[in-house]
Amino acid sequence: MTPSVAAVVPRRIAWVEGPDAPALLHGLLTADIAALPVGGATRSLVLTTQGHLVAQMAVARDADHAFTLLLDPYPAADGVAVIAAHHVSEDALVLGPEDARVLVATDDLIPLLSGAGDLQVPGLIPGTVEVLADDPAQLATDHGIALSPDAALEALRVACGAAATGIDTGQRTLVQEALLDASVSFDKGCYLGQETVARLHYRGHANRRLARIALDGPAAPGDPVTAADGAVPVGEVTSVAEVPGTGWMALAMVRHEVPDGTSVGVGGTQGRLLPPA
């Protein structure tokens, strides 16, 4: 059983409001914004016109024509800037981004957080919720939740294989490479970058994927991932964490043809590719 984790992390916050706000966001973001009910929230992405990942976000529908966006912090790119750049004649206001902080908590803590904070949305890490508040650390204390060590949330993220934008991804990373298909509606109409995403989904596969690697010892971001003989590079480490009860794990962008279960060299240690969490 995964232990409870709660931590305070930075985010960017923005708002899109006005009669054309639903159409603007529905036509740009990967999620089905038109189907999102008032009071609901969903994970989504903003992409370039070529289908490269710019930012991940949670989108909350505050009213029929009003939305709050919680986006990645630096080093992720500014996803709001992409939305604003494509906002031409719509009757909508794009406000922000501003810096914000949220309490990230595993789902088992949700009963303690009922009604807490200014906003609750699905987290970047599967199985977590993010709660917006002026003082998220005090909010945790007020609801009987002890904050975890700083490394605990990163360990959970790595163990889950959840990509951090700007850390595990680059300027040309595709949705399928980062394993972010769940943030895409494949039933809605066009959105920014839709042609590339749909082509890979229906007709092929990405040349790389973000893989979890169980390690025999510590490694570091930037370490090469090589085939068992150490001669052929097949990827590069992007994140590393020591996962309680499991040991050292890494995330790495590796070539598609390297199957799960493959033994690899990782920097000065050895590892094994794991299936998606």
Image: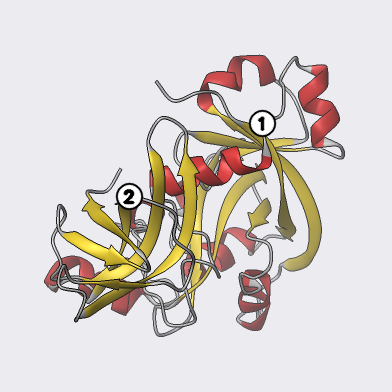
Q: Position of residue 276 (x, y in %)?
A: 27, 48
What residue is shown with label 2? 216
- Vertical placement of 34 versus 90: above or below? above
Note whether residue 271 is visible. Answer: yes
| C-alpha separation, residue under disc 2 versus residue under disc 1 | 25 Å
Rendering colour mode: secondary structure
Quadrant of the rendered image containing residue 184: bottom left
Locate residue 118 relative to residue 181 in the image: left or right.
right
Of helix, strand and loop, which one carries label 1?
A: loop
Of helix, strand and loop, which one carries label 2?
A: loop
Q: Amino acid at mark 1?
A: Ser
Quadrant of the rendered image containing residue 267: bottom left
Quadrant of the rendered image containing residue 138: top right
Residue displayed at 37% across by 66% down = 268
Residue displayed at 32% across by 50% down = 216
Q: Position of residue 95 (x, y in %)?
A: 79, 65
Q: Position of residue 3 (x, y in %)?
A: 50, 23
Q: Amino acid at mark 2?
A: Asp
Q: Nearer the viewer, residue 229 or 202?
A: 229
What residue is shown with label 1? 148
Q: Position of residue 165 (x, y in %)?
A: 53, 65
Locate residue 189 relative to residue 2 in the image: left or right.
left
Outermost residue to the front: 268
- Vertical placement of 202 versus 275: above or below? below
- Vertical placement of 104 versus 4: above or below? below
Q: Nearer the viewer, residue 101 or 273?
A: 273
Residue displayed at 67% across by 42% down = 150
